[in-house]
Amino acid sequence: MIASEANSPMKPHAKRSRVLPLILGLVGAYVLFVVVVVLLWEPGNGGPDDLDWDDRQRHNVATMAQLELGMTRSEVVTLLGSPDFSEAFEDGDGHNLQILRYRTHRTKGDGLTTLDETTPLLFQDDRLTAWGNTALSAVTD
């Protein structure tokens, strides 16, 4: 044995044998982290509320084309998701009126949804009676 190797506190193969377990430990920790994230991740229900604004807007337009008068508010919310705006009041005849507004077009690229970017859906006593701005004007005027 050479004198310099005899005085060395660690042999070269001993250094390598410590690096391999360290690398394997780090890879194992990463794999464990990925497994935990995948197991604990809870995706949305895949409904309209999980769409980004652009896809949601297209979804709303396409779905509104399939609405039928007389549908319940619950049926409509199941199809369209949560409304962007909601109003409710009682008319002079004692009927409960509710207006749900859904984004259907963009007027400003500011990332916010405003009333003028929505289409109103009108419900009387929990039944869809009309939708659109013309219908809203006829009811509120």
Image (spheres, rainbow, N blue to C red):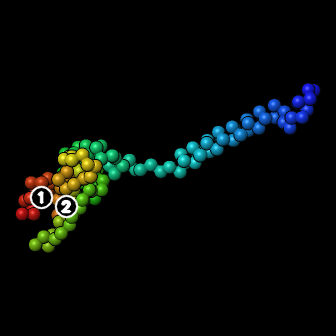
> What amino acid type is highlighted by mark number 1?
Leu
Quadrant of the image occupied by residue 13: top right
Q: Position of residue 116 (x, y in %)?
A: 17, 53
Label 2 neighbourhood size at 10 Å, few (<14), some (14-19), many (20+)? many
Residue 59 seen in render:
no
In the displayed structure, would residue 111 be above or below residue 97? above
The residue wearing badge 1 is 136
Label 1 neighbourhood size at 10 Å, few (<14), some (14-19), many (20+)? some
> What amino acid type is highlighted by mark number 2?
Ile
Identify which residue, 3 or 115, lies in the foreground.
3
Return the mark for residue 21. Answer: none
Image mark count: 2
Quarter of the picture containing the C terminus is bottom left
Quadrant of the image occupied by residue 19: top right
Query: Are circles 1 and 2 on residues that touch, CB within 8 Å?
Result: yes
Q: Position of residue 81 (x, y in %)?
A: 30, 53
Q: Position of residue 87 (x, y in %)?
A: 21, 64
Residue 130 seen in render:
yes
**Residue at 61% across, 41% down:** 31
The residue wearing badge 2 is 99
**Disc 2 on helix, strand or loop?**
strand
* Mark 1–mark 2 distance (CA, rounded to whole Å): 9 Å
Residue furthest out toward the top: 2
